[in-house]
Image (cartoon, rainbow, N blue to C red):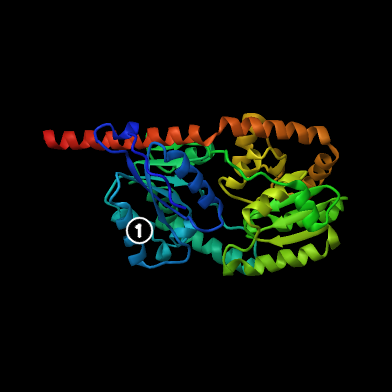
Amino acid sequence: MPLPHSSSRDAGAASTSRPLRVAMLTSWDEPCGIADFSRALAEALAPAVDVKVVPLKHGVFRPGYYRGLAAACSDCDVAHVQHEYVYFGGRDPWNNYWPLLARSLRVPYVVTAHTRLRPFSGGPWWKRLLRGTREAAYQAAGWSRFVQGGQFRTARRVLVHTRGHAQALLDLGLDATQVRLVPQGAPSRSLAGNAEAARKRWSISGPIVTIFGFLIPSKGHLLALEAWRRLNPRATLMIAGRPFSEADQPYAQSVARAAQTAGGSVRLTGYLEPQDLADLLAASDLVLLPYLGGTSSYALSVVLAQGRPVLASDLEYFRETAAEHASVAMFKAGDADDLAVNLQRLLAGDQQRQELSRAAQAWATAHAWDRIASQVRAIYAEVLESRSEAGRSSHAR
């Protein structure tokens, strides 16, 4: 979808006769949270900033591809990269193309770091041993420290969504003036959901609990299904989503097998179009985010913007969100028993769910995208001002 170009001047473009031009390097035309986040940010910036979207595709790991992306960004004033490791080859040094992209950019760049790397966990013993050995080698060589934070050292600003992530980057040696906490925004123009349409489509009359997003191990579907079997509630668990890539197909198959053991109380919908997902969320009595890891979640922003009650793992991002407006109920991450207890409590507690819904609406108001975009524009202005000062200083010498 093309973005409107504004003729108004941004605060960061005070020395020019045209609006600030920003290249947004991001996943775009695909169903993922970062693409949704980027679209919302680009639209919120558009009234004051000329946004050029440079789409980033997963699975294209060639040097020429990343040089081409850098060239496409370098005709703008600032590049803003939406970073997730999977789009740059992952954490292994022989397949990580981020340093090449950063070197190839010819304009100052800002990074939104959507992911904080965590140690690998789970899997058979031989895989854990292999990963542990490899991680020890990376630690000894200094690669782990570089890939977790040092690779962002040449960015003018690194934007993160949690205080914990910000502190981690500072601990890794990034400068305090470089790291900025910028919350995720709340979608202000979410599709209106039709709860009755969803109930009719899937022939559901009782309570609905929904998990949505990619079928990948970190999302915790198997944990949720384990808790669901222990609870055996008079409700329907809806799992909406698809594998992220071919490599996630075995996990998706394991989720399907686990769902079959729960009888008819679990439904797998596959990928849902935006309107169908909006309908399902509108019909949901509770949205479950049983993540085993992760740094942030735009799925949470989508759910809170629709005022739905949420039960989530007590991970850093969810804890920080809950601390703001008590908008998220939590259980112990990875603990199926605690998840079952809290599921039962919330399904039985209409008042508790209503309180979560009211808090969700308060969170969404405080995190409207126009407010977030204003913070981001101010950061662009800082970057251009510091560049101008550096240029004036160099010229004086």
Q: Is residue 385 left or right of residue 298?
A: left
Circle 1 — which element? helix
Tell me, yes or no, if residue 289 can be seen here: no
Q: Could you say which quadrant of the image residue 176 lies in?
A: top left
- Name the residue at the left extreme: 397
Q: Residue at x 57, y 45 (%)?
A: 296
Quick one: 309 or 169, which is closer to the camera? 309
Tag 1: amino acid: Leu
Write the residue at 87% across / 53% down: 232
| Residue at numbered disc 1 | 69
Residue 161 versus residue 380: which sits nearer the camera? 380
Image mark count: 1
Residue 168 place in picture, x, y as percent:
48, 41
Q: Position of residue 96 (x, y in %)?
A: 41, 61
Q: Position of residue 188 (x, y in %)?
A: 57, 38
366 left or right of 289 in image? left
* Residue 78 to residue 266: above or below: above
Question: In this rendering, would 260 be left or right of 151?
Answer: right
Q: For the C terminus, which image quadrant?
A: top left
- Residue 353 lies in quadrant: top right
Residue 92 x/y as whole percent = 45, 62
Query: Dot 1, how many residues are within 10 Å of its Cα: few (below 14), some (14-19), or many (20+)?
Result: some
